[in-house]
Image: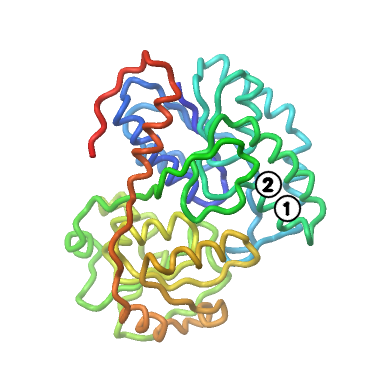
């Protein structure tokens, strides 16, 4: 069995790690899979075909957010202190599960607890990610010194990893002794663009999707320009199953996405060949790296928080629509990551040949 542990911070960790596990399932359908996470179970089961064991486990704190654009730094420090107070109990409980379930490898994106539990259970662990929580917490500890012990604890746990599968847009991952770059892991649309637009009831106007994940925005004035069709979260959330669409299908169906830059939305946009209008997201150290490295890869424009919340989006949308969409980059990281994971299992695992 392979056990995947997911950070509960947003859906980006879940979506990319599930892409890798879905590829593991395709290459080695006989390998049992388990997922431990505090994320919606139906989303995991839609992403990974076949049977799997889902366990609702709070694997980490991540960040406490006031909303999609603001970090509650004081709340994050308090939540991390409370989580770490039960560290040994949590790690022992997960180590017991790993031993009792016969788990042979732990994959984590990227809660430190998973690596500690795997170490205690004598199971190899593999990380997947473009940043680690020790780096994030040490950055915020300049203003919240209470986060320094959490950063130290995370770094110690990460050093137990046998390998980190490093993704693009990477921050400081030096706490991982062994790292291999696997390229970009991205979700791909499944429904043709024209059909997805039909199901969404879109007309011929350029369509703009305003998307900020499950945390949401404090308040957003409705954009007023009728030259574009605006899709707000209320127009999409809860309707995807009914429409037979995935979120990447929606991203491909529209012409522009307005969002904060995170690994998940950036790779969704790249895979769909869509344009992006992005805004800043507080003092999150991944943000400047994403902005710097995504700019050559996609058609994008910046809009400030104040203009976004006031609904002043028409001009940045016009500007980004005038930009050509670059060629799609290599998005084969899920296959490479899955292949590398299976190489770490013993040779008794039957595999079907990889395609491509």
Q: Quadrant of the N terminus?
A: top left
Find residue 280 and report its horizontal and vertical position in percent. Answer: 56, 71
For the question of whether residue 139 can be seen, the reply is: yes
Q: Residue at x 42, y 16 (%)?
A: 346
Please give left or right for residue 75 compared with residue 112 in the image. right
Q: How packed is label 2: few (under 14 Cα within 10 Å), some, or many (20 or more)?
A: many
Name the residue that disc number 1 marks: 138
Find residue 78 and report its horizontal and vertical position in percent. Answer: 77, 50
Q: How many marks?
A: 2
Rendered view: 47 above or below 316: above
Q: Residue at x 40, y 25 (%)?
A: 343
Q: How packed is label 1: few (under 14 Cα within 10 Å), some, or many (20 or more)?
A: some
Name the residue that disc number 2 marks: 134
Rendered view: 293 above or below 204: above
Residues marked 2 and 1 touching at CB (< 8 Å): yes
Q: Indicate the secondary structure of the residue bearing disc 2.
A: helix
Front one among 7 and 199:
7
């Amino acid at each position: 069995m392979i056990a995947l542990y997911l950070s509960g911070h947003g859906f980006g960790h879940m979506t990319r790690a599930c892409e890798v596990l879905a590829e593991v399932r395709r290459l080695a359908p006989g390998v049992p899979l388990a997922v431990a996470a505090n994320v919606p179970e139906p989303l995991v089961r839609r992403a990974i075909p076949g049977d799997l064991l889902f366990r609702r486990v709070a694997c980490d704190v991540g960040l406490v957010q006031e909303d999609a654009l603001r970090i509650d730094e004081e709340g994050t420090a308090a939540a991390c202190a409370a989580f770490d107070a039960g560290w040994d109990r949590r790690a022992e409980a997960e180590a017991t599960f790993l031993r009792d379930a016969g788990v042979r490898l732990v994959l984590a994106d990227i809660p430190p607890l998973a690596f500690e539990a795997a170490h205690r259970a004598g199971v190899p662990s593999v990380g997947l990610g473009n940043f680690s929580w020790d780096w994030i917490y040490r950055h915020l500890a300049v203003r919240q010194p209470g986060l320094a012990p959490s950063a130290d604890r995370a770094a110690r746990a990460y050093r137990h990893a046998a390998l980190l599968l490093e993704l693009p847009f990477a921050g400081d991952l030096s706490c991982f002794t062994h790292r291999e770059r696997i390229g970009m892991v991205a979700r791909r649309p499944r429904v043709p663009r024209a059909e997805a637009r039909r199901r969404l009831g879109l007309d011929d106007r350029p369509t703009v999707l305003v998307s900020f994940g499950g945390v949401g925005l404090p308040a957003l004035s409705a954009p007023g320009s009728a030259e574009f069709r605006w899709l707000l979260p209320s127009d999409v959330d809860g309707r995807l199953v009914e429409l037979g669409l995935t979120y990447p299908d929606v991203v491909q169906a529209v012409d522009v996405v307005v969002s904060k830059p995170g690994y998940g939305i950036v790779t969704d946009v790249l895979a769909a060949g869509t344009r992006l209008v992005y805004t800043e997201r507080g003092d999150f150290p991944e943000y400047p790296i994403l902005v710097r490295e995504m700019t050559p890869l996609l058609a994008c424009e910046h809009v400030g928080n104040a203009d976004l919340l006031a609904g002043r989006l028409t001009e940045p949308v016009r500007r980004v629509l005038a930009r050509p969409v670059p060629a799609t980059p290599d998005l084969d990281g899920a296959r490479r990551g899955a292949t590398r994971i299976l190489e770490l299992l013993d040779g008794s695992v039957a595999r079907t040949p990889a395609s491509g």
